[in-house]
Amino acid sequence: QPSLMFLDEPTTGIDPLLRTRIWEELQRLRSEGRTMLVTTQYLGEAELCDNVALIANGRLVAYDTPEGLRRARSA
């Protein structure tokens, strides 16, 4: 029962139904107070996270909540 989990693209190559079930489980773990660092190539999954970091060419280019990133993009 780790308090911190690192998940590197946990749903890559998985069918959409199983992907949804995995994220439901991740949400449950978060509600128990667990912290997860997740890498993903799917924007829809990033929107399920509390905070998002965008990295390009090994550099941090943005870090905010999903809503904060949307507001910055439209500004």
Image (cartoon, rainbow, N blue to C red):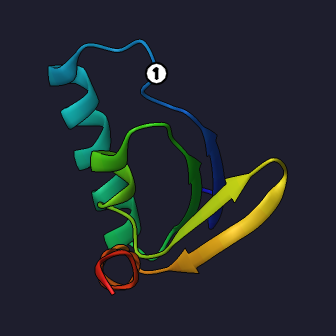
Q: Is residue 55 left or right of residue 38?
A: right
Q: Nearer the viewer, residue 39 or 66?
A: 66
Secondary structure under the numbered disc 1 in the rendered image: loop
Residue 58 x/y as whole percent? 85, 51
Q: Is residue 47 above or below residue 43?
A: below
Q: Is residue 23 above or below residue 71?
A: above
Residue labelled with disc 1: 12
Q: Position of residue 17 (x, y in %)?
A: 14, 22
Residue at the farthest front position = 75
In the displayed structure image, the side of residue 13 where residue 3 appears, left or right = right
From the top left corner, tell me how far across and down residue 53 is, in percent.
60, 67
At x 60% / y 61%, what residue is drawn?
54
Amino acid on which disc 1 is placed = Thr
The residue shown at (40%, 77%) is: 69
Q: Is residue 6 left or right of residue 21?
A: right
Dot 1, crowdedness within 10 Å: few (<14), some or many (≥20)? few
Report the number of numbered marks. Answer: 1
Q: Reply above or below: 48 against 66.
A: above
Q: Quadrant of residue 5?
A: bottom right
Along the viewing direction, whichever of 11 and 62 lies nearer the viewer: 62
Q: Is residue 57 left or right of residue 45?
A: right
Q: Residue at x 36, y 73 (%)?
A: 66
Quadrant placement of the C terminus: bottom left
Residue lying farthest right?
Answer: 58
The spot of residue 47 in percent (x, y) is 31, 61
- Residue at point 62% right, 67% down? 3
Q: Quadrant of residue 9?
A: top right
Question: Quarter holding the N terminus?
Answer: bottom right
Residue extending furthest toward the left: 17
